[in-house]
Image (cartoon, coloured by chain):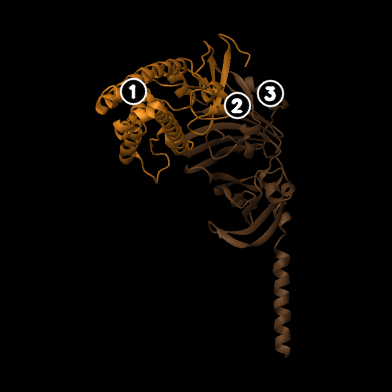
Amino acid sequence: MGVGLNDKVTLLSTASTGGMAVQNFTISGTVEFGMTAMDRGAIIADIADIQYALEMVDGAGEILGFSKNLFYNSKEADKYALEFNKRFSRPEDKYSPIMLTLEDQNGLREYIHYLDVVVLFIIGVFLFAMSAVLLNAGLMSGIRRYGEVGIRLALGESKNQIYKTLIYESVLIGLIGSVIGTLIGLLVSLYFQNVGIDVSGQFRNSTLMVSNLIRARINFPSFYIGFIPGLIATITGTALSGIQIFRRQTASLFKELES
Amino acid sequence: MRRIIFSVINILFISITISAQTPSGSDILKQVDKNLIFDKAETVTTMIIHGRSGTRTVKSINWIEGKEKAFVEYTDPARERGQKMLKLGDQLWNYIPEPTDRIITISGHLLRQSVMGSDMSYEDITENRKLIDMYNAKVTGSEKINGRDCYVLELTAKVDDINYYSRKVWVDKERWLPLKEERYAKGGKPLKKIEILDVFRVENRWYPRKVLYKDLLQNGGGTEYVVESLNTHVNIPESQFTKAALKK
């Protein structure tokens, strides 16, 4: 805009009465909200001055509500909006107060539901693929160790004992792998939680009050979700391949080992 | 047979006589234009705006020269006191007094803004052409409005750059005042309704005393525009219709 500190700017807007609102303001600084919609046209001013300029002393056109943890909770927001509208909103009067959730505005509900489905799909595919890979790894290791199991059986180790040691081993491998994987995943997530991904280009012409940065969030499930494919799939793979141990005939062991 | 021929001739004669008495649409528009436009006038007016959040009263002194020049100074309420508006042809300026002290050119989307929150827009004010220059008029009948005989006219735009594509106007047959008017968009959507509720005589013509404007797209109760006084023998200096006069 080419204006500096202490310069005078004139706000041209529409007053609550419908007339033209014209008021001078002095620039005392600039601020970046990190939301394209706000950075494009929002100003911070004394609320009393704005109310005077827009001829709405002690009034407000819109009041924004935030939860204590600053995260949007769809179910709670729906509950509050329903209760409020039941008490104060009158459909026949378009100027009666109405509470709208974030999702009720600008078709955001459909967008958020779409994102939820996409995220669930991505997580599902990832979990399935990782489980399949690890299950396969467990199966393969069982099959590759066919000779080792035969020798152990020939040396007199019981089938149960061998099966148990294989399971313990897979638990240990799964645990170590999951811990290392989770640690790496957490470090990457921590980076995206602190730095984020800039999506301001997507919201250049948007009026949605959405942050320009999309950030990862480390929460409690982040610590255990990796153990589902890491531990369960590895153990299941080993357990399934280990069943072969019980089908081995001691009488034919030497024949197999000779060959 | 002779009786039938006589009746037909009689009916034809009566029809011709009636149609000869009814002036054409363009003649009526010329009379309306002539009646409402003053060479020079000073008026004191009150706007009673019945908005959705209550009723406001705005008073002003107006200096008018034809349809081209107008200067308005708002005198009441305190918040609006000192605000001025200058119209020169199709140009419009608003002056906001101290501490804002700014002259704002009303153009573009600002023209659609309401004047002081009333049911009139700046676009309505800047319209300075005569009705006869903007519309083709057709007389569609006669009706009584508030006990007065009126011609019913349907106006259709004959120019492109126009705020209202069509209008339906009820014109008083004796006083040449549009007692009622409905203004429509090109698609036929009703936009404004205007009714003259009271009139008074100025020299040899009738002029509206109280007019009710209703913006049909707004939820309020309309705007009453009351002419408190009208002085046609006034000497308005040419400097009154200049931007310099806004800051005086």
| Residue that numbered label 1 is attached to | A151
Residue B243's label in the rendered image is 3
Residue B39's label in the rendered image is none
Chain letter of mark 1 equals A
- Residue under disc 1 on the same chain as residue under disc 2: no
Drawn side of residue B169 relative to residue A216, left or right: right
Within 10 angstroms of label 1, few (less than 14), some, or many (20 or more) residues? Answer: some
- Label 1 sits on what residue type? Ile
Chain A pictured colour: orange
- Label 2 sits on what residue type? Lys
Residue at position x 51%, y 33% in the image:
B58
Chain letter of mark 3 equals B
In brown, which chain?
B
Element assignment for label 3 = helix
Closer to the camera, B43 or A233? A233
Q: Position of residue B20 (x, y in %)?
A: 73, 66
Contact, mark 1 vs mark 2 (Cβ under 8 Å) = no
Q: Position of residue B50 (x, y in %)?
A: 47, 40
Residue B84's label in the rendered image is 2
Relative height, residue B109 to residue A188 (above, below): below
Closer to the camera, B135 or A176? A176
- In the rendered image, the residue lying farthest to the bottom is B1
- Label 3 sits on what residue type? Lys
